[in-house]
Image: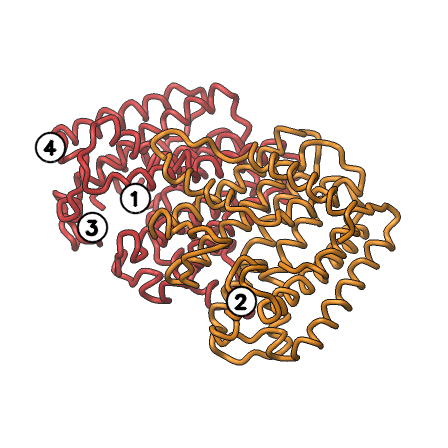
Chain colours: A orange, B red
Amino acid sequence: MNKEFGEELAVRTSQVEAIIGKYLPKEEGCQKTVIEAMNYSVRAGGKRLRPLLMWETYRMFGGRSEVIEPFMAAIEMIHTYSLVHDDLPAMDNDEYRRGMKTTHAQYGEAMGILAGDGLLNYAFETAARAFELEPGNGQTGKALAVLAQKAGIHGMLGGQCVDVEAEGKPLSEDMLRFIYRLKTGALLEASMLIGAILAGATGSEQKQVQEAALELGLAFQIQDDILDVTSTTKELGKPVGSDKKNHKTTWVTLFGVEEAKQEVERLSCQSVKRMEALVVKNEFLASLMTALIHRKK
Amino acid sequence: MNKEFGEELAVRTSQVEAIIGKYLPKEEGCQKTVIEAMNYSVRAGGKRLRPLLMWETYRMFGGRSEVIEPFMAAIEMIHTYSLVHDDLPAMDNDEYRRGMKTTHAQYGEAMGILAGDGLLNYAFETAARAFELEPGNGQTGKALAVLAQKAGIHGMLGGQCVDVEAEGKPLSEDMLRFIYRLKTGALLEASMLIGAILAGATGSEQKQVQEAALELGLAFQIQDDILDVTSTTKELGKPVGSDKKNHKTTWVTLFGVEEAKQEVERLSCQSVKRMEALVVKNEFLASLMTALIHRKK
């Protein structure tokens, strides 16, 4: 990561943080506890990659309105809810994430379930605010439909379900690709596609962006598999070696580290090239996508 | 319930069932299990009261398009998801509902969580199909916003959270009214309000309908409290006496059965009167609302 890009990324990320913060529910009323639990989960941090990608794709196609903001917050809420429910005792049973107690470990199991539900629901409540922000934008309904589709049973959630069922079983390459495409890829697809849709990109532009996001998502997940065996707990901020411990089939267990690295490289290059082939350009977005290949955490 | 109304109700309910069925996800693909679990939960039955109220309110204001259908299915999915998550071991830990195994008892706890998430998400995915069905209806975005608000932390889910936290504690009348308004009232409000919005009712008509729905919701929940002490398990289709067993504060524990009955009567009359004061009429809807006062299950 060169210094200039690093600085720019820090600035953009803090702008994204501010936008997310603006759309979080107020911690007040009798429902205060669940709202606190929701905000605790969102504030626990992360790279804010999905809203970043959405915003930059929106800018790339000339989007200039704040209509994108509720969608940026919404996709981060959906990403967060999936982590909250994934961590539950009946699921992965994780007590810590990013060095902080997971939501159910902090607020109890019932509140962990309800906070996850709250975030998923609030994501759509938040996205629906876009209808007021820019009533004339005929694309908002389509953007909301994409958000719901890519988060649901034919997107992220579907990937998680197949993943849960596959636990402890050997997986084929095709099956693993399917799970990655849904579990990790779908929300990245949604991010970039929603950015393109709301900015008024053409149908063929939307298609290109979606393909690029899909490849990026696969590369991102395979990189995750690699880091689980090559990184350290300190560097990664979460326990390494967890895939082996859980007997998970990953790209690394199927093909080894070296081939996995080559696949990341191949997918990422393809993804970046697809974006470069578009008439509009966003150099920062290109750098961001490239940085994801070389990420260490 | 007079015979004519009873027959009409049976016809309408089966039409509603058909509409819901049409919008359920296909049980196919690698995610088949979770989709089966979702559909199992929805098909487990119920009175379909929310879509019925929505449809009749829509008709009352002259609505004639199928744009209402995805919203009818969506509200039933949201109602169902809330039951699925409510039944989980970390929540009410119920193994049976309406004489059938609850979702987690049938499919395991992880799948219970995921099926609930799936239904909540699919509700918005389904509702968003209304944008394609009637692209010219400028009210669809508002209807979707109402759906999200009334289902979320300032609606049904908020009520559930307060209810969970209040367990085992004495409650004041105000607090109980607050919980009932959110937990039961909010989705009934959403149902009738969405019907009015999509049919193009005026602002003041929408306000009247919402108030009427709120009173109906309170009456409905207090009637629930009454049936828990006056009905039999066989008649009700679920265990009676559960409130006492769980040391729950209800309208009956606060005021006794007789006063509770009077409150149901008062609220219901007020609600029906409010609807009668509107320029448009729907006799079936009025009968339906009245029938809810006298329901035995």
- Side of A177 where B49 appears, left or right: left
Q: Residue at coordinates 50% horizontally, 40% vertically from top-left? A: A122
Using the image, name the chain to which the residue with label 4 belongs: B
- The residue where tag 2 is placed is A240
Q: Quadrant of residue A94?
A: bottom left
Label 1 and label 4 in one chain? yes
Residue B66 location (% of width, % of height): 56, 43
Dot placed on the residue nearer the N-terminal end, 1 or 4: 1
The residue beneath circle 3 is B236
Q: CA distance from mark 2 to mark 3?
A: 52 Å
Q: Indicate which label's residue lies in the foreground, 1 or 2.
A: 2
Q: Which residue is mark 1?
A: B6
Between marks 1 and 4, how big is the CA–CA gap?
30 Å
Amino acid type, callout 2: Val
**Horizontal and vertical percent for residue B144?**
54, 38
- The mark nearer the N terminus, 1 or 3, is 1
Mark 4: amino acid = Gly
Residue B279, x across and y down, in percent: 45, 20
| Residue contact at pointers 1 and 2, CB within 8 angstroms | no
| Residue holding disc 4 | B256
Helix or strand or loop: what does disc 2 sit on?
loop
Residue type beneath disc 3: Leu
For the question of whether residue B15 can be seen, the reply is: no
Q: Secondary structure at mark 3?
A: helix
Callout 3 environment at 10 Å: few (<14), some (14 to 19), or many (20+)? some
